[in-house]
Image: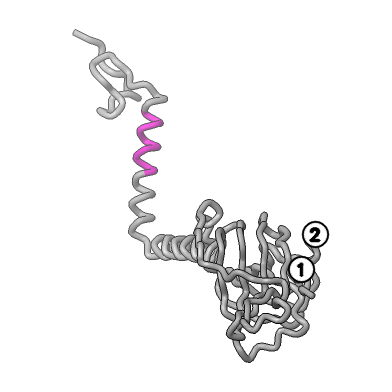
Amino acid sequence: MGARCPGEWRRPATCLAEGQRFPQSLLRVLMQGITVRTMLRRLLRSPVTWGVVLVVAAGAAFGLYWFQPWKLITNKEVFEPVPSVAASATNGSPTPVNKLLASGNFVSHEHSTTGTVQLVQLADGRRELVLLDLSTSDGPDLWVWLTDQKVVMDSSGWHVFDDGRYLQVGRLKGNRGNQVYDLPTTADLAGYRSVTLWCRRFTVSFGAAELTTTR
């Protein structure tokens, strides 16, 4: 006849068989597991817990909307037909031509940016802003602005373009390619000296180009 469990081991939960002890370490693990499950059940039944879950979920959703981190690895290519231009009208030519009023090359600010910008007056008198071979990062709430600010390459020039006078030309159509933007017929372009790819959400320039007038 096997030995009986000692007095302190007579509870069924602590006795595997007659004469065998249940390992204390395993018992502690099981008891801890039961305690954790009990706590989880209590937490899930609590309105406070669900309130916290909803707040965290709402915060995460807002963060994704506001920062849109996926745009760091996405690209939108737009290749529109661009007007051919002449530096000046042909002497004695009776036929109006598209004229290049000003141009400049992009420099990088918050994000690496390359390409060329042209301010063009069409033969019919309309004016367009043209972006050629543009390459920059995608981002939230990006706009094309004409501004009266000087382009500074270092970080001191990244946030200045909303300090003075600016013309909001339109939302950036894509972060790569060739794009054409119509300018308002009533817009007074005198005094504008630069173009910026402006992120309105974070008030920072992705890249900018200093305009040089064509003579």
* Picture quadrant where residue 14 is located: top left
Q: Was residue 87 drawn as part of the magenta stretch in this picture?
A: no
Residue found farthest to the left: 1
Q: Nearer the viewer, mark 1 or mark 2?
A: 1
Residue drawn at the location 61% of the way across and 58% of the way down: 133
| Frontmost residue, 42 versus 103 | 103
* Picture quadrant where residue 102 is located: bottom right
Mark 1–mark 2 Cα distance, whole angstroms, equals 14 Å
Numbered disc 2: secondary structure: loop
> What residue did someone put label 1 on?
210
> What residue did someone put label 2 on?
154
- Range shown magenta: 27-36
Give, as a three-letter code, the residue at label 2: Asp
Give, as a three-letter code, the residue at label 1: Glu
Residue drawn at the location 42% of the way across and 60% of the way down: 53
* Residue 96 seen in the current view: yes
Residue found farthest to the front: 92
Horizontal relation, residue 160 to residue 5: left or right: right
